[in-house]
Image (cartoon, rainbow, N blue to C red):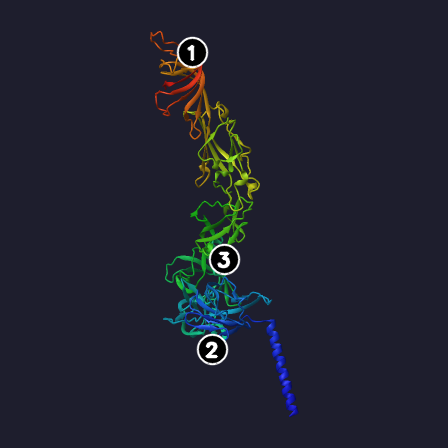
Amino acid sequence: MLHLFRFRSLCALATSLLLLCAFTATAQNTPLIRDLSLRTDTMRYQLSRNTVLVQNEPNLYFYYRQDDETAELLVYPQQVKPNAPLRLVRSADFSLLDSLTAIEGGQYYRAKLRFKDLGATRYLRLTFRQPSDSVGHPALTQTVNLLPVTRTTLEFKPTDTELFIGEEKVFTLTSNYPKNIRLSSEWTKGQDIDYRLDQENGALRLHVLPNALGTRLLTMRAQTERAFLIDNNRRVSFALPPIRQEFTVKASRLRFLSVDKKEITLDDASRRKGVELILDNGRTFDLKKTYRIEDQEEAGGGLVAELFTRQYLTNDRVLCWLRVYNTHRQTDSYLYIKENDQAKYITNFNISPKISINTVSVRHRGGDWSTNTNVNPGETVDVRLEGESLSRGRFHFEDVRIIPSDSSIRTDASVVYRVQVPITIDKKRITIFNAGQPTGQSLPVREFQRPHPLDFVAVTFGEAPRPVTRLNGPVLYDKTIRDVVFSFNAGAIDSEQQLYGKQYLTFDIRTQNAKGELIEMRTVDNIVVCPDGNSVRGAFYQDKQCQVGNISLNNLLGYRKTYDLDDWSKILITVRHTQAQYQEPGFTQQLELVLQRRVKFDIDISFPAGLLTKQINSDVKGYNSFNGISLATLAQFSFYNPNKINKLRPYKVGAGFVAFNAFNLSQDASVSRELGIVVLGSVYPTRSDAKFTFPLYLGGGFLLNKQKMFFMLGPGIGIRL
C-alpha cells in the first residue's frame, strides 16, 4: 500500500508538472482564436475539423467553384476581451465586404469575404490581430493558412484511334476547369507515343506523335495548377488520375526521315552553296547523287529544295548538302524526297525567308498606328515590326527597355513590342538590333514639341510683369505707356511629369487711334522659347534659334511709338503658337491695351442763347430779360466715364470769356452788349449721334464793362460736324 501511495503521488506530481509546462508554453505563445469557420454557398469548413498539412503546416481547406468565391467567416476567440477586439488584417487576395463584427459581446466575430482569382492566388492567409488592452497584455497576431481546392475533371474520348509513324495528330480534351490544367510546350520523350498539352481558344488540345508500330498504349499523366485532396481529405495532390488510351499505330506508306535541323533560312548562301544537313539513312540512298524535294507526292510538284548525298556516318545517318529554292512550313504539308519523279521518302522541316523588316510603325499612348516613327524622351510606345520570318528574330532596341505586355504579338509577319524611352536618353536615334546585328531600322528620337499654355509669357507696360493669360479683356491704362515689353519664363515650360519642348510663338501687333483706324500693323513670327537648364532635357534644347532676352514693342513699331500714341489709342497684341510647328492645336491669347484718360482739356467755342443773368449790386431787380445769341470761348475740362472706353460724362467745367448778345441784330437801344470773364459748367446730352445739341449753362463771372459780378443760366446751341 505504501508503494502504491508513493506511485500515485509521483504520477500526480508528474501530471502537475506536465500541465504547468503546457500552461507555460501556452502563455508564451497564446493563440488568439479557438476556432474558425468558413462557409461558402453550400458547405461549412472549420479549422478544428477541416485541416490538412501542406509543407508541414496546417491549412484550412475549402472547396470553391468560382474564382471570386464569396464566403462567410465566423471567428471564435480564445478569450473574450471587449476592450481589445479582434481585427482582420486586409490583404490583396480578398475584399472585405462586411467588416469583422463582434457578436454577443465578443463571443464570436462575423465577416463576409470575396476572394480574388482563387485559381491563381498562392499562399492565401487570414491574419488576425488583437491590440494591447488596458491591463497591459501585449498586442497579439495569429495567421491561419487557407488552402482553396477544387474538383477538376479531365476526359479523353477520341473518335479515331488510328495513328501513323512520324505523323502528329491533335485531339480535344474535355475538362470542367480548363484553367486548372497545367500545360506543357515540350514533348515527352522515350515513350511509344509521345504527347504534349496546349490550349487554343480556351480548348485543351492533346498532341500525340507515335514512335512504334502496333497496338500501343498512351498513358497521359496530367497535372493541375491548384491542388486537390485525396485519401479522404488527408493529403494534397497535383496529379490527376492517369488517362489510358490504346491506339493502332501503322507504318506510313513512305518512311519518314528525320533531320538534325528544323529551321532553314532561304537566302543566297543556302540557294547557291547549300546548307550542311544530317539525314536518316534511307537504305536506298546513292552517294554523290542529287535528289529532288517537292511538297506533293504526285509527279510535277513545285521544287522546294535539292538534296545531295555526300557520305555515310557511323550512326546510320547520311551527311548531305541541302540547297533550298522555296519557302515551306511544316504545318502546310510533308516534304517528299523523289528520285525520277518517284517519291522515296518523306521528311519535314521549315524553310523560312531571311529575317527582314520592311515596315516599322509606332503607336503612341491613346493614338493609332503611324509610320511616323519619331519617339520622345520619357515616352512609352508600342512598336510594330512588319516583314518576313520575324517570329525567329531576337530583337532588342538600343538603350531602351522592353516592357512585357499582354498585347504583344509575335508572328512571322509582324511582332509588337512595348518600349519605354528613358527621359535622359542622349541619342538622336534608337537602333533596332537582331541577335546583336543592326537591322537597318531605327526610331528617331525627337524632343517633345507640344504647345504649352501661354502662362510662361509675361508682359510689362509700366507695372510689374504679369502673365498674358491673366489679362482677359481690355486693360485701361491711364498713364503714358513708355514701352510694352514681353519676357519669357523658360523654367515654367517643362516639369518632371510633363515635357513640352521648344515653344514657337507668333506675335500679331496692331495699333489704332481713338476712332478705331489702323495706325500700324506688324507680325513677328518664329520666336523660339526654349526650356532652361532646370528641365531634364534642357541641354538638348539649346541652339541659336532660342530667344535670349525680352522683346520690346517699340523696337518693332515704326514711326509711332507707344509713348507717341494719342489718348484712347489701342494696342492690340495677339500671342499664338505657330501652328505649322505642331501636330495639335496651339494656344492663343489676345492683349488689348487702351490709353485711358480721366480728363480732357480743350478750348471750346459755343453759342449760349437766351441766358438769364443776375447782376450783383445792380439797380435792376430780379433777372434781366433773355439775351440774344452770345459767343463763349472757354477753356474746358471734360470728364470720361471710368467704366467705358472713350465715353465722356454729360457735363463739362470751364473758364473763359463770354460776349453777351454778340449776334443780336435788334435795333432796340436798351439791348447792350457786354463782355465778361466767366466760370461755366455745362450739361450736354449723352447721345453721340446727334448733330444738333442744346447744352445748358450755369455759372458766374465778372462783367468787364460794368465792373460787376453776375450769375448766369441758360441754354446754348451746339453743332456737331
Residue 181 horizontal/vertical position (percent):
45, 68
Residue 675 — which label?
1
User: Sequence-wise, which precedes: disc 2 or disc 1?
Assistant: 2
Q: What residue is shown with label 3?
A: 275
Q: Is residue 348 above or below residue 457?
A: below
Which of the two discs, 2 and 1, sits closer to the camera?
Answer: 1
Q: Residue at x 52, y 69 (%)?
A: 145
- The answer to the question of whether label 2 and label 1 lie on touching residues, with beta carbons closer than 8 A, is no
Q: Residue at x 46, y 38 (%)?
A: 581
User: Sequence-wise, which precedes: disc 3 or disc 2?
Assistant: 2
Tally the marks. Answer: 3
Q: CA distance from mark 3 to mark 2?
A: 60 Å
Mark 2: secondary structure: loop
Rate crowding at label 3 as few (under 14), some (14 to 19) or many (20 or more) other CA atoms within 10 Å. Answer: some
Q: Is residue 547 above or below residue 373?
A: above
User: Sequence-wise, which precedes: disc 1 or disc 3?
Assistant: 3
Residue 197 horizontal/vertical position (percent):
44, 67
Which of the two discs, 1 and 3, sits closer to the camera?
Answer: 1
Quadrant, the C terminus: top left
* 16 on left or right of 156: right
Quadrant, the N terminus: bottom right
Q: CA distance from mark 1 to mark 3?
A: 126 Å
Q: Nearer the viewer, residue 176 or 562?
A: 562
Q: What residue is shown with label 2?
A: 232
Residue 79 — which label?
none
- The answer to the question of whether label 3 and label 2 lie on touching residues, with beta carbons closer than 8 A, is no
